[in-house]
Image (cartoon, rainbow, N blue to C red):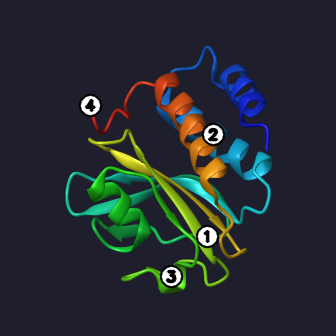
């Protein structure tokens, strides 16, 4: 996968727009369309309480609210680090929003002090290797730097 080329395309897609919601919607659609073997791509944002709330996404309908600290998204959020899970059914405390999802990669927005996460799922076991992790983290970083923090987090 040519993540450098995807990064160039993404920078062009997001350039000139700082609205968080608009760029998040385009980013989710871009990732869903450009990354092979993906069944879901989207955002969850901290609500200021104990939950992550569904944001812009592409794919099947999803869980609307996830408890912080639970499941892959909650764990990535509370740890402030990217998680790659080869088999979500083997992940302790996995939350099943889509029974077809088998592997998952979740990147906090931003790392170390997140206000949300970007989540990408696949129906294929072990879909996300080290190259995918690094490439997707770079693309998420491009997204983060293209926008102001969401207004509800400011």
Viewer-nearest residue: 142 or 66: 142
Q: Residues within 10 Å of mark 4 (few under 14, many from 20)?
A: few
Viewer-nearest residue: 36 or 86: 86
Pick whichever of labels 3 and 4 is earlier in the sequence.
3
Mark nearer the viewer, 3 or 4: 3
Q: Position of residue 96 (x, y in %)?
A: 50, 82
Q: Name the residue under label 4.
A: 154
* Quadrant in the picture for the N terminus: top right
Say which element carries label 3.
loop
Pick whichever of labels 1 and 3 is earlier in the sequence.
1
The Cα atoms of the two marked residues, 1 and 3, are separated by 12 Å
* Quadrant in the picture for the C terminus: top left
Q: How crowded is mark 3: few (under 14 residues within 10 Å), some or many (20 or more)?
A: few
Say which element carries label 2.
helix
Residue 96 marker: 3
Say which element carries label 1.
loop
Q: Where is residue 42 in the image (x, y as percent from the top left)?
A: 57, 54
| Left or right position of 2 against 69 | right
Say which element carries label 4.
loop
Q: Name the residue under label 1.
A: 61
The Cα atoms of the two marked residues, 1 and 2, are separated by 17 Å
| Left or right position of 25 against 66 | right
In the displayed orientation, state which residue is furthest to the left: 49
Q: Where is residue 131 in the image (x, y as percent from the top left)?
A: 65, 48
Q: Name the residue under label 2.
A: 27
Pick whichever of labels 2 and 3 is earlier in the sequence.
2
Pick whichever of labels 1 and 2 is earlier in the sequence.
2
Pick whichever of labels 4 and 2 is earlier in the sequence.
2
The total of numbered circles placed on residues is 4
């Amino acid at each position: 996968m040519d993540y450098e080329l995807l990064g160039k395309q993404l920078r062009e897609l997001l350039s000139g727009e700082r609205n968080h919601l608009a760029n998040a919607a385009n980013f989710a659609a871009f990732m869903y369309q450009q990354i092979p073997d993906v069944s879901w791509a989207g955002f969850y944002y901290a609500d200021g309480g104990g939950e992550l709330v569904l944001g812009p996404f592409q794919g099947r309908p999803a869980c609307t609210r996830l408890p912080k600290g639970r499941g892959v998204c909650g764990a990535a959020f509370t740890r402030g680090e990217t998680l790659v899970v080869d088999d979500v059914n083997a992940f302790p405390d996995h939350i099943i929003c889509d029974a077809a999802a088998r592997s998952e990669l979740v990147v906090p927005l931003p790392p170390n002090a997140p206000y949300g996460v970007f989540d990408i799922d696949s129906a294929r076991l072990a879909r996300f290797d080290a190259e995918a992790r690094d490439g997707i983290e770079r693309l998420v970083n491009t997204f983060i730097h293209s926008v102001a923090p969401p207004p509800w987090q400011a």
